[in-house]
Image (spheres, helix red, strand yellow):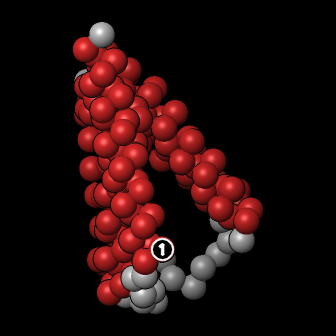
């Protein structure tokens, strides 16, 4: 379990690095072109991973519930918004805003048991975590504002 958490933290670090790189690229070639390049390269790498490492599954794209294929649209939304927002508001605010949005939606999905997930009760610890992230966002925003005023 700890290893999975460490890997999730590492993937978050990769997303922030990707946001920084893509934000700069988006300023030079455009937001949508940057998204296309990112997804194009990701498609090639993912295809190679599937070819060489993916085990065979009983289901395929033709047999899974079609609503499960909509997840890709959320990835596009995330990438385009990050590419457009990072140059304007900075990596930290964009990332923490994204994390706060993830926390809010994940708490709703968890407590309601939506999308085939087992329900997880909302409790004071989960609420405190979400409030902490909201406070972190406020602090980072205030720090950025103070820096701009100097």
Left or right: residue 30 compared with residue 90:
left
Residue situated in front as seen by the camera: 44 or 25: 25
In the rendering, at what x and y percent does residue 143 appear?
35, 28
* Residue neighbourhood size for the residue with mark 1, other residues' Cα within 10 Å, grouped as few (<14), some (14–19), many (≥20): few
In the rendering, at what x and y percent does residue 98 appear?
35, 50
When the figure is inspected, residue 81 is found, relative to residue 22, above or below; the finding is below
Q: Residue at x 74, y 62 (%)?
A: 3
In the rendering, at what x and y percent does residue 49 appear?
64, 54
Q: Residue at x 70, y 60 (%)?
A: 53
In the rendering, at what x and y percent does residue 99 appear?
40, 53
Q: Quadrant of residue 20?
A: top left
In this view, the residue farthest toward the top is 150
| Residue 34 visible, this orientation | no
| Residue 73 visible, this orientation | yes
Quadrant containing the N terminus is bottom right
Residue situated in front as seen by the camera: 94 or 45: 94
Q: Quadrant of residue 124?
A: bottom left
Q: Quadrant of residue 58?
A: bottom right
Reading the image, the residue beneath label 1 is 125
When the figure is inspected, residue 22 is found, relative to residue 106, above or below; the finding is above
Residue situated in front as seen by the camera: 70 or 126: 126
Left or right: residue 19 compared with residue 55:
left
């Amino acid at each position: 379990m700890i290893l999975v958490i460490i890997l999730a933290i590492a993937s978050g670090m990769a997303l922030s690095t990707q946001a920084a790189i893509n934000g700069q690229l988006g300023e030079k070639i455009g937001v949508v072109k940057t998204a296309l390049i990112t997804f194009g390269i990701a498609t090639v790498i993912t295809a190679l991973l599937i070819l060489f490492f993916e085990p065979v599954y009983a289901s395929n794209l033709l047999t899974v519930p079609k609503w499960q294929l909509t997840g890709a649209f959320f990835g596009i939304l995330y990438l385009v918004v990050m590419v457009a927002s990072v140059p304007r508001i900075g990596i930290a605010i964009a990332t923490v805003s994204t994390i706060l949005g993830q926390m809010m939606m994940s708490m709703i999905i968890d407590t309601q048991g939506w999308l085939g997930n087992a329900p997880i009760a909302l409790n004071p610890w989960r609420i405190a975590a979400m409030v902490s992230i909201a406070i972190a966002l406020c602090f980072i925003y205030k720090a950025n504002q103070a820096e701009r005023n100097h």
